[in-house]
C-alpha cells in the first residue's frame, strides 16, 4: 500500500498538470486566474507606491468596472490612505491601469489572525545618572508648578523623595 501511494505522488509531480493548468482548461477557471493575476499586479504596484506602514497592511479587495476597492485594518490606516489616493491613482494610471475611482474599506481583522500586544512596563527603567539629573533639576526649580509636581511624583515613586 505504501508503494502505491508513493507511486501516485510521484506520478502527480511528473506528468499531471498543476493547479493553474487545470484552472486554465475552462473559461471560468481562466477568468479566475486572469483576475487573480490582475489583482496581484495591482497589489505589487501598491507596495511600490505606498509608504512602509501602509504598503504592508493595505490589500486589494476588488477591481470592478474601473473601480478599485482597497482594504485596511483600521480607520487610522484609512485616513492616511485617503490622503495618498491622488498620488496612488496617478501612479496606477501612469502604469497603464484604467481607473476612475478608488474606494477604501476598513477590514477589522484584515484577514490576519489577532496577535495581542504584550503589556508594557508601567515603570520604564531609569538609570542612576538619569535619576540624579531629575533630583538636580527639581532642586533648581524655583516655583511649585506642574513640572515640579511631576518631578516630585516621579522621584517619590523611585524612592528618591
Image: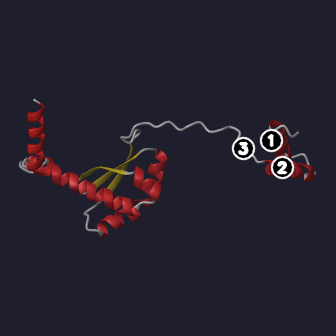
Q: Which mark is residue 154?
A: 1
| For marks 2 and 1 on the same chain, the one whose residue lies earlier in the sequence | 2
Task: Residue 3 in the image: state x and y as whole percent.
Answer: 10, 34
Indicate whether 97 appears above or below 2.
below
Question: Quick one: 135 or 98, which is closer to the camera?
Answer: 135
| For marks 2 and 3 on the same chain, the one whose residue lies earlier in the sequence | 3
Which residue is label 3 attached to? 125
Q: Residue at x 92, y 53 (%)?
A: 140
Rate crowding at label 3 as few (under 14), some (14 to 19) or many (20 or more) other CA atoms within 10 Å.
few
Which of labels 1 and 3 is toward the front? 3
Q: Residue at x 47, y 51 (%)?
A: 79
Rate crowding at label 1 as few (under 14), some (14 to 19) or many (20 or more) other CA atoms within 10 Å.
some
The answer to the question of whether label 2 and label 1 lie on touching residues, with beta carbons closer than 8 A, is yes
Dot 3 falls on a residue whose secondary structure is loop
| For marks 1 and 3 on the same chain, the one whose residue lies earlier in the sequence | 3
Question: Quick one: 66 or 13, which is closer to the camera?
Answer: 13
Amino acid at each position: 500500500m505504501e508503494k502505491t501511494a508513493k507511486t501516485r505522488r510521484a506520478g502527480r509531480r511528473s506528468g499531471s498538470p498543476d493547479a493553474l493548468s487545470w484552472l486554465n482548461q475552462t473559461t471560468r477557471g481562466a477568468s479566475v486566474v486572469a483576475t487573480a493575476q490582475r489583482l496581484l499586479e495591482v497589489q505589487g504596484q501598491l507596495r511600490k507606491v505606498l509608504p512602509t506602514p501602509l504598503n504592508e497592511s493595505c490589500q486589494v479587495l476588488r477591481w470592478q468596472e474601473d473601480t478599485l476597492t482597497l482594504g485596511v485594518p483600521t480607520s487610522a490606516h484609512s485616513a492616511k490612505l485617503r490622503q495618498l489616493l491622488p498620488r496612488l491613482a496617478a501612479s496606477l494610471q501612469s502604469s497603464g491601469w484604467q481607473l476612475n475611482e478608488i474606494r477604501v474599506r476598513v477590514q477589522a481583522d484584515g484577514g490576519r489572525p489577532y496577535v495581542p500586544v504584550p503589556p508594557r512596563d508601567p515603570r520604564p527603567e531609569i538609570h542612576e545618572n538619569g535619576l540624579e539629573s531629575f533630583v538636580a533639576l527639581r532642586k533648581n526649580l524655583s516655583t511649585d508648578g506642574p513640572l515640579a509636581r511631576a518631578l516630585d511624583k516621579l522621584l517619590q515613586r523611585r524612592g528618591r523623595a
